[in-house]
Amino acid sequence: MSVQTCVRAVGCLVLTAFAASGLWAQVVTEAEKLDPNASAELKAFKAKVQAANPGMEVVAVEADVVKRAVLAPLPQPVNPKIAIFVKNQTRVAGMDDEVDGVRDRISAELAGAGLIVLDKAEIADGFNRFKITTAEERSGLVEGIFTGGSTVRVAQMLGCDYIMLVSIIGASHTSRTAGDKPVTIFTLRMSTKVNEAAQGSSVYGANWTNKLPVPGQYTDGGDALNYYNDLFDQWATATGEEIAQKAPTWRRGPAADTTLAEFSVSTTVDELIQGLEGGVRAPNELLDEMRRLVGGVTVEIDGATVGSSPGTFKATPGLHQMRVTRQWMQPWQQTVNIQPGATFRVALELSDAGLQRYRSLEGFRAAVAIGYAEAVMRKGVKINFDTSAWRDVGNRGGEINVQQNAVQ
């Protein structure tokens, strides 16, 4: 006979902490002993055991109930990211130099409102990832935001949830008199707009105008920017307070789609080679190999090589930087919107070095034809293609002659 000793906690509350999925969680455990005279479940259990053992008597039944509750920290709110762009629309001397200061003022206010403001370095890095490196390219993108055409594109590049557009619409001063004393009234007009990143729609917009009276007569050439800066301070404070109240109600764009979209890329070089395939009888696998070997066109997405053209590739839907290159050709580079089934046909042109080598596009075509024929023959396949319709580029310089009608 074995004797078991049981220690029971009646009405005992136990708190245990453990780490789960990187977050600390707590388990609350409560154990209690059931009353055999009150528990219907224990009474039924006793009757069942007694019925199964008629030659014996059930003298006692007991049971413990253990309840557990798991507590975990509430998920922390993810502060949305916002990029701020400021544009000076006035002709006030020196106002262009105040743009960064205006941005810094409103950035500080928004940071206090729970928004993560991208700084200038982060914005520059975002553009650089998409190979938008020149001042002209960036200026064009930013100008497009203010005209309503580039919000989604720029937001994807920067990885932000919102884009704020601030315009310095007007800055002026007028002379008045207060009693017998001259007063100069400085007036500043601003507009502020916030667009969400998913569709580019507006979630906030406001016009702001304020005046600052200054004793005395202002003369041109004086430092009016000091007074406008006081008005900028007022604008930033008022706008920041209003946004702090309204930002929690702004709608957020849907989560980015992680499903890969299939798209295809081809070039004019591929089309040239395709025109030569009519004189070749070979398996499709060999023809595909020749297209890539002789074509030599490389496709890059966001700085990473994904394969050779012509081809079908996969990437996340949305904006990407595509770069297509081939020796002796000018690199082709554009921001493209990749969606399922998208097809991109790239027209490649000879680079300066290519023009020096081949003299003309016809010379390049002839060289590709000869290179294709030689590559196919090395595979043991005969080729016969008609070049009679081609312009004669002669034997000058590159020793290229396409007057022959057949290559075997």
Image (spheres, grey):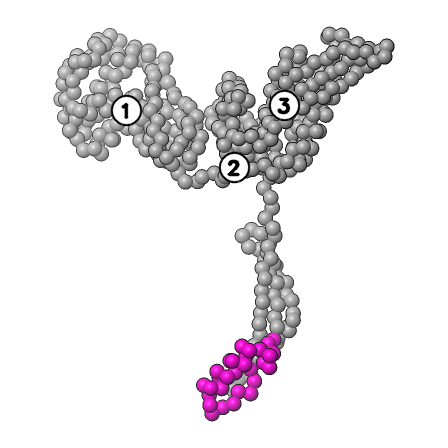
Q: Earlier in the sequence, mark 1 or mark 3?
A: 3
In this rendering, which labeled residue sits more in front, label 1 or label 3?
3
Q: What amino acid is found at the position of numbered circle 3 in the picture?
A: Ser
Which is more toward the observer, 250 or 302?
250
- Lateral position of residue 91 relative to residue 287, left or right: right
The region drawn magenta spans 33-61
Q: Residues within 10 Å of mark 3 (few under 14, many from 20)?
A: some
- Lateral position of residue 341 relative to residue 273, left or right: right
Q: Residue furthest right?
A: 180
Q: Which labelled disc corresponds to residue 191? A: 3
Considering only vertical position in the picture, is 307 above or below 87?
A: below
Which is more toward the observer, 104 or 367?
104
- Lateral position of residue 186 relative to residue 159, left or right: right
Which is more toward the observer, 326 or 279?
279
Q: Position of residue 358 (x, y in %)?
A: 29, 13
Q: For the point 60% across and 44% down, which residue is it?
A: 77
Considering only vertical position in the picture, is 236 above or below 405?
A: below
Q: What amino acid is found at the position of numbered circle 2 in the picture?
A: Gly
Q: For the point 63% across and 14% down, which residue is it?
A: 90
Label 2, on which residue? 253
Q: Residue furthest front?
A: 179
Q: Residue furthest bottom?
A: 55
Give the Cα separation between the discs numbered 1 and 3: 51 Å
Q: Quadrant of residue 116?
A: top right
Q: Position of residue 85 (x, y in %)?
A: 59, 24
Q: Residues within 10 Å of mark 1 (few under 14, many from 20)?
A: many
